[in-house]
Amino acid sequence: MSDDEKPAVPSTLNEAVGYLKDGGGYDVAVAALFLAHGVPMPPSIIKRFRIGAGRLIDGSFDLLAGGLTRIKARSDFDAKLQQAVVKAVAQGGASNLAQNSPEVSTTVALSMLNEYGLKLENKAAAAQYAFEELVKSPPLQDEAADADISADWLNYFSDIAAQKSDPEMQRLMGRILAGEIRKPGSFSPMTINVLSTLTPAIAQKFEQLCSVTVEISGINGILLNIFPEFLAKGVPEIGFTYLDLLALRSHQLLANEMGSTWTIKPGTAYHISSCERRFVLHLASTGGEQQFQTALFSQVGGEMRRLVFPKPVTWFDQKLSAAFSQPTWNLLPA
């Protein structure tokens, strides 16, 4: 092979990052990383993971160590790099500061490094959790192989992920990224926006409420037939108060309307799930329609519901069975 025929080799850090982002040998390496964990992945999933995680941490992966590098810029940047940043700051308009107050100039540069390092570490954690989610529940087939993650969505997600230092919030961000890698468009920008202001305490209250909610044919909510005073008192049995209800509404996790009606029709089968337990409700063709009053999750709440895994409440199973107990009904595990 002549020199002209040899593939281009990156010679600088910026070129190397661009090379990886463009897929130069990187998809093969990522596929090997998943295979090292015993998980084969479709090529389209590999590509989306490369683009998604690469956007968060600029393609900085420690594949030889078998995992994503948790970059800590505060300890990784040495004195030489610190001096280089001080010089860059000075050239950017702070030359007078650098000449007359070098200590202040150094402090400014180190502050920039520390803030950058913290944000990068937060984003790297979200990428790591996304990888773990994909390994735990691998999509062996991709039903949307031609779909791409929106660049605007990734940019916005990266900005919010950079702000989240709490491990549980980072885990939520990782689950969202993994869901978007599995199927682009699964999570709306509105959900990312809500996460920007969501606190761990509110997230815990949402997960607590999810332990007594149901999903019926793709719709999430609280059955008011089971909790008739929910809209006035919350669910005292699990310590979920009316103030908690208002807090979830203010974070756009619950719909603002007072209640909705869910109508079930005879001769139909309905899929019902609660805390990862799935049932099928079979209705005989005889009998009339039945209505259930529900307090619904919002679109954001419905998307967030897929991210939490609350512990089952045993007594809720009995209430659920009682709510769907009719002579011509048959509620069976799916």
Image: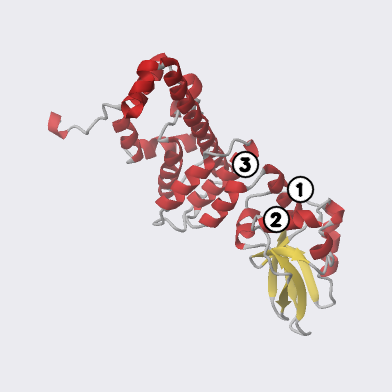
Residue under pointer 1:
311
Residue under pointer 2:
248
Marks 2 and 3, how far apart at CA: 16 Å
The residue lying at 39 percent from left, 57 percent from top is 146
Percent across and percent down for residue 105 are 42, 20
The crowd level at tag 1 (other Cα within 10 Å; few <14, some 14-19, many 20+) is: few
Decide: is 230 above or below 11: below
Query: Which of 145/147 is in front?
Result: 147
Percent across and percent down for residue 165 are 59, 35
- Residue flagged by tag 2: what amino acid is it? Leu
Query: Which of 282/210 is in front?
Result: 210
The image quadrant where one finds the C terminus is: bottom right
Decide: is 42 above or below 29: below
Marks 2 and 1, how far apart at CA: 19 Å
- Residue flagged by tag 1: what amino acid is it? Lys
Decide: is 158 above or below 71: below
The residue lying at 42 percent from left, 55 percent from top is 145
**Element marked by disc 3:** helix
Percent across and percent down for residue 273 are 71, 60
Residue 227 occupies which quadrant of the picture?
bottom right
- Is residue 67 visible to us here? no
- Residue flagged by tag 3: what amino acid is it? Met
The crowd level at tag 3 (other Cα within 10 Å; few <14, some 14-19, many 20+) is: many
Q: In front: mark 3 or mark 1?
A: 3
For the image, the number of numbered tags is 3
Question: Which labelled disc corresponds to residue 169?
Answer: 3
Residue 77 occupies which quadrant of the picture?
top left
Residue 246 occupies which quadrant of the picture?
bottom right
The image quadrant where one finds the N terminus is: top left
The residue lying at 59 percent from left, 40 percent from top is 170
Q: Are marks 2 and 3 in contact (CB under 8 Å)?
A: no
Marks 3 and 1, how far apart at CA: 18 Å
